[in-house]
Amino acid sequence: MNRVVAIAINTFREAIREKLLAVILVFACGLIAASFGVGKLSLHEELRVIRDLGLGGISLFSKVLAVVAGVNLVYKEIERKTLYAFIPKPIHRWQFIVGKYLGLVVTLTAQMALMSGVLALTLLAQDAAPDGALVRALVLLWAEALVVTAVAVFFSTFSTPLLSGIFTAGIIGIGRSTPELHALITSQLKDVPGLQTTLDWATQLVPDLHLFYVSGSMVGGKWVTVNAGDFISWSYVAGASGYGALYAACVLALAMAIFARRDFV
Amino acid sequence: MTEPAPAIRVDDLKKTFAFGFLRRKVQAVRGVSFEVRPGEIFGFVGPNGAGKTTTIKMLMGLIFPSGGSCELLGRRVPDVHAKRRVGFLPETPYFYEHLSGREFLHLCGRLFDLPADERRARADRLLEEVGLAGAASRPLRKYSKGMLQRLGLAQALINDPELVVLDEPMSGLDPIGRKEIRDLIGGLRARGKTVFFSTHILADVELLCDRCAIIVGGAIRDVGPLEKLLSPKLLHTEVVIERDGHAEERRLPPGDDVQAFLREALAAGGRVVSVTPVREHLEDLFVREVEADKARQ
Ligand SMILES: Nc1ncnc2c1ncn2[C@@H]1O[C@H](COP(=O)(O)OP(=O)(O)OP(=O)(O)O)[C@@H](O)[C@H]1O
Ligand SMILES: [Mg+2]
């Protein structure tokens, strides 16, 4: 366990010293703060604008950060041969993946906390305080980012950063539109039952990221929005996070299996 | 009393790489076998592309053999318990560029579960020993090639290993650095450690090794103590004679009467500058093996 923690700490330390990630983060914080100005342009809708833009910005940039850090995570180690010094140390290969992933989780948590802090300050500048609904929305986004990170790390164990980035972006795209895909499959292909079940199964393999961004859509037959009274409950957040954790664990297990069999040439 | 397990045992080890779109096959290592005994300094010598690094990577669990087996300290690779007692210097020691030398050594110490004060003491001592004490808090991306090589050596020794495996420890070092590393390896021997290192610099082998293996084209040509590998016979006698202000070098084959040749030269008014009996060097053996390998193909 100590060794996994050592690798995680090192991953965190490397990530916060990485210029590219820092630049993206500063840019994201700037945009979130700029929602204050955009809010002023709207008539009496300042709070709604700040909350929507803030959440949208955090959703987008947390994924950008997760993908950029995730797709490089293992690939860079092999490419730069930094791995050569570690594999011969008394660790198992899977521990390396666990440590790296945990390091990214800590990094991403810190980055999202910072962005959330900027959003909270922007709201305070508008004489409003972050409420429970906003916190629940943020926790969901955090859970989603951890799933995306796991997917990016998975691709990074066997493919180049560019391809991994494209694959991960594709998975995010499909994962975010699962209800639409589902509707499409049922409406268009109802006459070909074999194909429909196959496609249904295929969509099950992709993470249902729609679960994590629910403001402005139907949940359980009810319209929810983060700006109104009855947003999703904490038990919904717990359920979705549980699903995310399970999905991430499965993807990481696959990543470890691939990593354990690789030649590091 | 039973004989102690060999520090390294390699048995009929093979590795075939497939590369490129067509999966073309390259046999990098073709059935290599040898043993390294505890406490010896063992040289793994061969020309570029002979398969030294490939063999070492299999020993270290970085790549998987296509055939055969290898053991470290009596345990089949990969084995976490054996890894605790082994230190390794990779051929290309590139480390995390954002870490400082000291931070990197601490990280390595953590991977060996060393307590904090032990880590600090060893890191400081090793930085001193490899001559990096002044650069300890500089980030690694600002290190020169030779400095990275020195840090690589320091991290290989952080766990006070019984067995040290070094892939070309002298590469990238200046002559002083090479001497320092030679002394360091000598110091390891004095403390009863086993050292296995690869090189194509023959002088290092002659100065350091108890035994060596010669690998050419992915196969072992010879294993043994240097004296045994080098044929002890006289190759020729080199005589330098000065006559009328200019020196002339002659090589007398083993059968020739050197005394008679010298008497003649003196009688003709020459001056004897030097007489050197030349025996086989590792380099000659090396050339002989490489040429034999070419002839076989
Ligand atoms: N990943 C790889 N894919 C294909 N061929 C490889 C690969 N790695 C090594 N080889 C081939 O295997 C052979 C042995 O390479 P290796 O790196 O083990 O040599 P070496 O003895 O360490 O040489 P050097 O003294 O230059 O370091 C070479 O012919 C090399 O081209
Ligand atoms: Mg090599």
Image: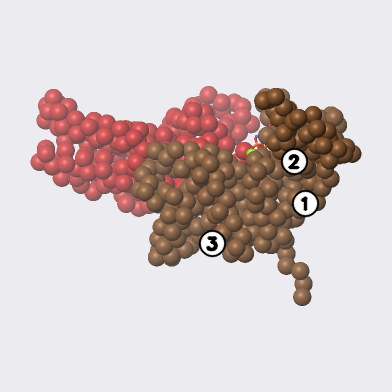
Q: How many angstroms separate mark 1 from mark 3 (CA)?
A: 31 Å
| Residue carrying label 1 | B227
Q: Is mark 1 on a helix, strand or loop?
A: helix
Q: Nearer the viewer, mark 3 or mark 2?
A: 2
| Residue carrying label 3 | B160
| Location of residue B150 in the rendering, given as x and y in whole percent from the top left corner | 49, 47
Q: Chain B is drawn in which colour?
A: brown
Question: Number of marks in the image?
Answer: 3
Could you say which disc has been placed on residue B64 in the image? none
In the image: residue B271, left or right of residue A136: right
Q: Earlier in the sequence, mark 1 or mark 2?
A: 1
- Identify which residue is drawn at 22% across, 36% down: A51
Q: Are marks 3 and 2 on the same chain?
A: yes
| Residue carrying label 2 | B276
Q: Do labels 1 and 2 share a chain?
A: yes
The amino acid pointed to by label 3 is Asp
Look at the numbered disc 2 and say if its residue's Cβ is closer than 8 Å to ligand 1. Answer: no
- Identify which residue is drawn at 38% across, 46% down: B135
Residue sitting nearer the eye, A129 or A88:
A88
- B245 shown above or below B223: above
Quarter of the figure with the C terminus of chain B: top right
